[in-house]
Image (cartoon, rainbow, N blue to C red):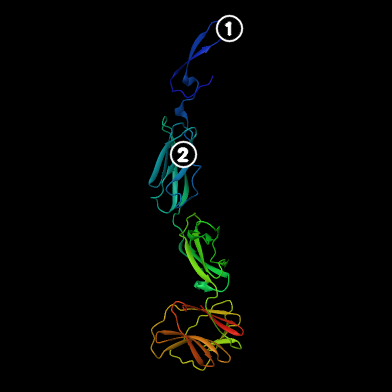
Amino acid sequence: MEIRKIQTGLTLGMLILPACGGGLNRSALNLSDLIKNPGSISPTVTLDSFPSQINAANVSLIPLAGTCAVENGAIQVSAGTVSGSTVCSQGTWALNLDFTSLAEGSITIAAVHTNSSSGATLSTSTTVVKDTLPPTGVSLVINNGWINTLSTSATLMLSATGASEMYITAISGCTSGGTWEAFLNSKPWTLTSLNADNTLYVKYRDAAGNESACVLSNIHHGTGTSYSDAFTGSALSSYWQNKTLQSVSGGEVIFTPTPNTTVAAQSSVRLDFTDATVSVEVTQVLNTSASTQTFLYMMDESFNALYIYVSNSNIYFVRELAYNATTIPYNAVTHRFWRIRFASPNIFWET
């Protein structure tokens, strides 16, 4: 005989057949003789299924689930000011909550199971972390911000606060073309578009899975316009501060002028430019008095030179053969970026 779900107190009629035949005897049993009183069942409850991290992607729909003991017994779930309820069904329960209104940080989720017949309750709880804030201060810079390069080898400078991963791609919007990798502050990169603009995109992700906006940076690969002078000897000096010799290969040199100082006819900084490149980006010409001139020279030992100077709010690009100056007219667009390159026996200025 199989007994399915039957109300408490129902009288169950049965026919009992004697083993040796004979007449039918009718008997009656109360259901309580066959099953245990549901009111005596102790409620047990678990909270087994929940997101390990609450982030921007799932915060409005948090699935929670677990096991329970009392069929149709109430399950009340709460997390701070957010709550929901359901009933135990075939030993399990499940519901969804919206944690959007809760503050960032640690959140305790509690589940209470009640036996409506006896009033007995049992509760369980767990703790999760809500973090819906993406990495901040995100940026991407190629080759220290220079807008032109002659090499396909580039260096990416990556910045983001709170990031654990990054996604670099050449596809606009960071929708495809890359893979998530561990966050680094810098990364070597090979430019693929020759003699053309190269645009790269990056987005960042934190440990909770929150993604930043997609940001971009670009650089032009190509030689641009070149001015070449067949100077002999090494390109050695720049008129700036006092008598310091240093190599610029693979690094940066920051020139700090000495105000109100005449440096004509003396070499104040000597730099070895052999197989090196100097990049100059003109972003602003400051107002100066007519008597003030600021120079950046590239000169060989025979005093042949290429230089930039600022005088009375104007900028000049000049080539000199032993002090016989020929001025290259300044164009604010094409001359915003200049690359000074020495490849013996020539010195190149390139935009």
* Residue shown at 40% from the left, 53% from the top: 103
Q: Secondary structure at mark 1?
A: loop
Q: Which residue is mark 2?
A: 94
Percent position (x, y) of residue 326?
49, 89
Q: Residues within 10 Å of mark 2 (few under 14, many from 20)?
A: some
Give residue 257's position: percent from left, percent from top.
47, 85
Residue at the extreme bottom: 265
The answer to which of 288 and 226 lies nearer the viewer is: 226
Q: Up-down: is 165 above or below 282?
A: above
Q: Observer-nearest residue: 223 or 86?
A: 223
Mark 2: amino acid = Ala
Residue 111 vs residue 349: left or right? left
The image shows residue 106, relative to residue 337, as above or below, that is above
Name the residue type under label 1: Gly
Name the spot of residue 341 as percent of width and height, x first: 56, 80
The residue closer to the viewer here, 190 or 37, is 190
Residue at x-position 56% and y-position 5%:
22
Residues under numbered marks 1 and 2 in contact, where contact means CB atoms less than 8 Å apart: no
Gap in angstroms between the C-alphas marked 1 and 2: 53 Å
Is residue 140 in sight in this rendering?
no
Q: Quadrant of residue 261?
A: bottom left
Q: Which part of the image, by quadrant, shows the N terminus?
A: top right
Residue 222: horizontal and vertical position, in percent?
55, 73
Determine if residue 341 is in view.
yes
Q: Tell which circle, 1 or 2, labels the residue nearer the N-terminal end.
A: 1
Residue designated by label 1:
21
Residue 178: numbered disc: none
